Image: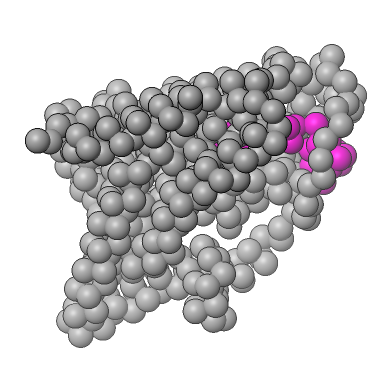
Amino acid sequence: MKRKISTTKLIIIALFLGIIFGALGNSFFPQPFSEGIILWILKPMGEVFLRGIKMVVIPLVLFSLIIGTASIKDIKKLGRIGSKTLIFYLSTTALAITLALAMGNIFKPGMGVEKIAGGSVETKSAPFVMDLLVNMIPTNPIESLVKGDMLQIITFAVIFGIALTLIGEKGDSIINLFTDINHVLLKIIGVIMKIAPLGVFALISQVVLTQGLDILVTLLKYFLVVAFTLVIHTVINYGIILKTLGRVNPVIFFKKFWPVMLVGFSTSSSNAALPVTMETCTKKMGASEKISSFTIPLGATINMDGTAIMQGVAVMFIAQVYGIPITINQQLMVILTATLASIGTAGVPGAGIVMLSMVLQQVGLPVEGIALILSVDRILDMMRTATNITGDAVCTMIVSNTEKELNYDLYNNTDIINEIEYSESIIKKYSHFIYYVIL
């Protein structure tokens, strides 16, 4: 006998159990025992889940984007969709970092904080705009696929899709083949998502078990300002945008998208959450597959609203700790640099720190200041990833609506919210596993 159970409930339960288990382990387990649990149980379990999703990300981006581009048929329409998508992503990123700078000026998270010893960080110079444009074109598409260079893969896929459109009926057989491959990849994702609660439990447990919750006390003000700004942007800004530009109920959006946000939170990777984001937007919220195949892979590469918020607050935090005043002109430069730096940044854990080093150098702040926030960045990275992928989905809804390709009946159908069938045996195995790990 089968029973229906909400994916959201399973993931939320796993999330809280992971936090509780990690906190208790950090407080009471001896270090060798904790390291053993991480090495032999949590790390392999989390890695299996992550690698399973990442396994299909590159081919899914390639085939879905080719299909999406070729299916549009009309080159003018493709240009219109591309323009809307780019304008949305760059505008919301600039809005996000402007909000973050405002919050940093209002709450002053760095006031009264002593310089804290921290780790090292890889630094980079701010990217030159023309270099970004030139490097978008791959010299070897196969090499781009192997390296996972998302911006080059996206460029090649769009060009390939346009070429398929231009050759007309001769390209139909290739489009049909790629469509079948895309369906297979989505089915693989469906199978992998059955172990999502276990993966979420393992990933969050590692973070809390390793770092504990004490570090939050030291940097509590900075942490809370970033978290608060992320919530404001995700719930209020995106909610208003959905209502005004998307002509949809934001409450329904968040009810249906909540499990995907949890996947993004636990994996800290926009790329890892990409397949789940695409499936949710099309199967549960009625977005056009042609449009979602274009907007979501592109968003995973260039849409970094959550990361921009962290950078804005971090810039003000570091400046305040070091006692360096930041002028309005410098803050405008932060907005410009962070927005441009978001283009082509890898949608993987920790990429925001590399972007932050670019921004700090651009406005003359000490890059060493990044060491102050490294201790809590892993947790904030999880939160900002949830914001990043939410922005990708919101853009998909907006563009689908403006192109009159949004299925409102499916969007407003709340009977399908986050429900997946699981057999009783799977539920029992999952419950027993968590029980034995905790005890």
Residue found 25% across the figure and 30% down from its top: 6
Q: Is residue 5 above or below residue 355?
A: above
Residue 135 coordinates in the image, percent (x, y): 61, 70
Dominant SS of magenta comes to helix
Residue found 62% across the figure and 30% down from its top: 209
Q: Look at the image and tell me whether residue 289 can be seen.
A: yes
With 245 as the anchor, is 203 left or right in this view? right
The quadrant of the rendering that contains the N terminus is top left
With 182 as the anchor, is 357 left or right in this view? right
Residue 197 painted magenta: no
Q: In which image quadrant can residue 333 be found?
A: top right
Magenta residues?
360-382
Residue 299 coordinates in the image, percent (x, y): 46, 50
Judged from this view, the residue extending furthest toward the left is 1
Q: Nearer the viewer, residue 218 or 127?
A: 218
Residue 363 painted magenta: yes
Q: Nearer the viewer, residue 422 or 270?
A: 422
Residue 17 coordinates in the image, percent (x, y): 46, 24
Residue 87 coordinates in the image, percent (x, y): 47, 48
With 275 as the anchor, is 98 left or right in this view? right
Residue found 41% across the figure and 54% down from its top: 53
